[in-house]
Amino acid sequence: MQERTLLRMSIAVAVAAIVMKTGAWWVTGSVGLLSDAMESSVNLASALFSLAMVTIAARPADDDHPFGHTKAEYFASGFEGLLIAGAALAIGWAAAQRFMNPQPLQGLGLGLALVVASSAMNGALAWKMMAEVRRTGSVVLEADARHLYSDVWTSAGVVVGLIGVQLTGWLWLDPAVALLVAANIIRAGARVVWGSVEGLMDKAVEPEVQARIDRTLARFAEPQIRFDDMVTRRAGSRRFLDMHMHVPAGWTLGRAAALRGEVEQALMTEVDGLRASIQLLPSNLEARFNAVESTSP
Ligand SMILES: [Zn+2]
């Protein structure tokens, strides 16, 4: 099944989960169930964001955005992180109120049935997504599926808490579980925001990508050729690399350019989504930003 189809299903399932869990909260009055419903709204936001990301990232570069549109996802995920933090604050507020003013829970049977049904839906979709991940290696789907699995665990925790309230009569268990869920939501939100900040700050490529770049360059190693001044950055699914290739000053431009073409091609074949630009220089010249200086040959 296609990536976008699964993401659309994920949006539909998230909406259904929000409705069912909000219903469960309304029936029982449990803030734990309210927090669970809020966490599903986080899932909805992230599924919408993933669908937008897959769509925008697929858009080719144009005159206005010659490097492509892949950075759009960082704006979307930054916004998503803020939504997540807002949900966690709302849960914290509701739980604090409930600690001060404990209330007995009602209609637990129906409430729990709604939560278990929506968790079964989440679990089934996550399982289907992971099957697709094993087939295609889609990182977007993998992130969404992990999100869904963590939602199932959250619901399981809330259910255990509610059964605990029923068995022991300790009303404080319900807001305590809600606070744990809120803490987990804040952790997820912080990770999303941090990821988008790092993306906007032009973080260097991942160590494993750097290792593949180094391995590829090693294939072209010769005493008279030198690669240096390498800088890398990532933008969504794309990777960019700039560096120097120093060749003997006596080489013809044609020979040097042919080798540069080979190196660039090898790099872009090895690393999917990489754009490599290599500056040609003679062995005895170094160029850094605007300064050109001679080094000993
Ligand atoms: Zn150099």
Image (cartoon, rainbow, N blue to C red):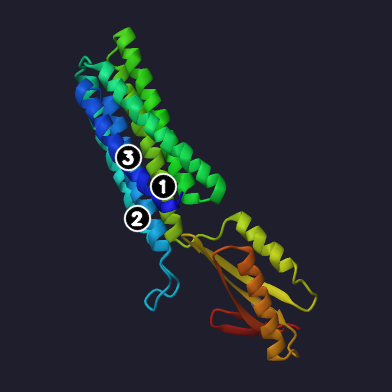
Residue 59 % position (x, y) = 40, 67
Q: Which residue is mark 1?
A: 6
Q: Are there few (<14), some (14-19), or many (20+) residues within 10 Å of tag 1? A: many
Residue 292 falls left or right of residue 187: right
Q: Residue drawn at (39%, 35%), measured in percent from left and top?
A: 122
Q: Residue drawn at (31%, 21%), measured in percent from left and top?
A: 112
Q: Are marks 1 and 2 in contact (CB under 8 Å)?
A: no
Q: Residue drawn at (39%, 79%), measured in percent from left and top?
A: 63
The earlier-in-sequence mark between 1 and 2 is 1
**Mark 1 CB in 8 Å range of ligand 1?**
no
Q: Of residues 10 and 155, which is closer to you in this image?
A: 10
Q: Which residue is mark 2?
A: 76
Q: Which mark is residue 14?
A: 3
Query: Mark 1 falls on what kind of element?
Result: helix
The earlier-in-sequence mark between 3 and 2 is 3
Q: Of residues 1 and 86, which is closer to you in this image?
A: 1
Q: Nearer the viewer, mark 1 or mark 2?
A: 1
Does residue 165 lie above or below 63 as drawn? Answer: above
Q: Residue drawn at (45%, 58%), measured in percent from left and top?
A: 199
**Mark 3 and mark 1: span between their CA atoms?**
12 Å
For ligand 1, give the image quadrant: bottom right
The earlier-in-sequence mark between 3 and 1 is 1
Instruction: Please tell me in which quadrant of the rendered image residue 264 appears.
Output: bottom right
Residue 232 % position (x, y) = 56, 66
Does residue 105 lie above or below 254 as drawn? Answer: above
